[in-house]
Image (spheres, grey):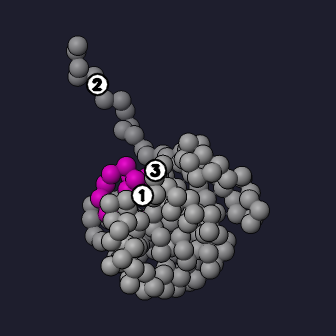
Amino acid sequence: MRIACVHQGYELYGSDRSFAESVAALRAAFPAAEIEVVLPREGPIVEILKPHASRIVFEPLWVLRRQAMFRLATVEMARLPAALWRAWRRMRGSDLTYINTSIIADYALAARLLPRKALLHIHEIPEGILRKVLVALMRWSKADLIFNSRATRATFGDPPAIDAKGRRTHVVYNGVAGPAAALPMTYDG
């Protein structure tokens, strides 16, 4: 089995750690799988992914960010066809593609062309124009959906467990391992 795992981050913030936990869970569920992780660049997250990934690759991703919407709609639009081609090629060669956020537009768009091959994990509760864009993208995509909370699911229109297109949706709460033991309290006031 070939699994591609795509993430827009490269640091060690909450979403990065949540992604690493998801990759570890996929490795535990499919120990013999070839798991390829796609990141936009090298960063601290690589070290915690190495034990679970067969391969880690770095390539540009077409990521929707509120502060970059104008640039994406103008200057960066020329990069979209190449980004879609890369995403489609990788997804076509994989049995499953795990996309770790709704803002990775190239993979969400490519999922439309390869139904039942993508799993889109939605963590964001966007607002304004970005919300409208992401809801439309999610609906247009043929990916199965995972939401990290009922609130996130509600933000995206509260889709049913199985929609009219046969697409499945689930709520799976974020899980990041805590410390092995509780730390002593140091605050006395």
Element type at marker 1?
helix
Which residue is depicted at the point 50% across and 73% down? 107
Asked if residue 103 lies left or right of residue 113, the reply is left
| Quarter containing the N terminus | bottom right
Asked if residue 169 lies left or right of residue 81, the reply is right
Which residue is depicted at the point 38% across and 83% down? 79
Which residue is depicted at the point 74% across and 66% down? 165
Callout 3, which amino acid? Glu
Provide residue 54's location: percent of width, then percent of height: 44, 73
Element type at marker 3?
loop
- Residue 90 in view, yes or no: no
Q: Is residue 181 above or below residue 17?
A: above
The first of marks 1 and 2 along the sequence is: 1
Name the residue carrying label 3. 127
Magenta extent: 7-19
Callout 1, which amino acid? Ala
The first of marks 3 and 1 along the sequence is: 1
Q: Is residue 75 above or below residue 104?
A: below
Element type at marker 2?
loop
Whether 52 is among the magenta residues is: no
Q: Nearer the viewer, residue 120 or 46?
A: 120
Name the residue carrying label 2. 184
Callout 2, which amino acid? Pro
| Quarter containing the C terminus | top left
**Residue 138 lies in quadrant:** bottom right
Q: Nearer the viewer, residue 114 or 32?
A: 114
Name the residue carrying label 1. 20
Asked if residue 80 lies left or right of residue 46, the reply is right
Provide residue 75's location: percent of width, then percent of height: 32, 79
Question: Mark 3 and mark 2: span between their CA atoms?
Answer: 39 Å
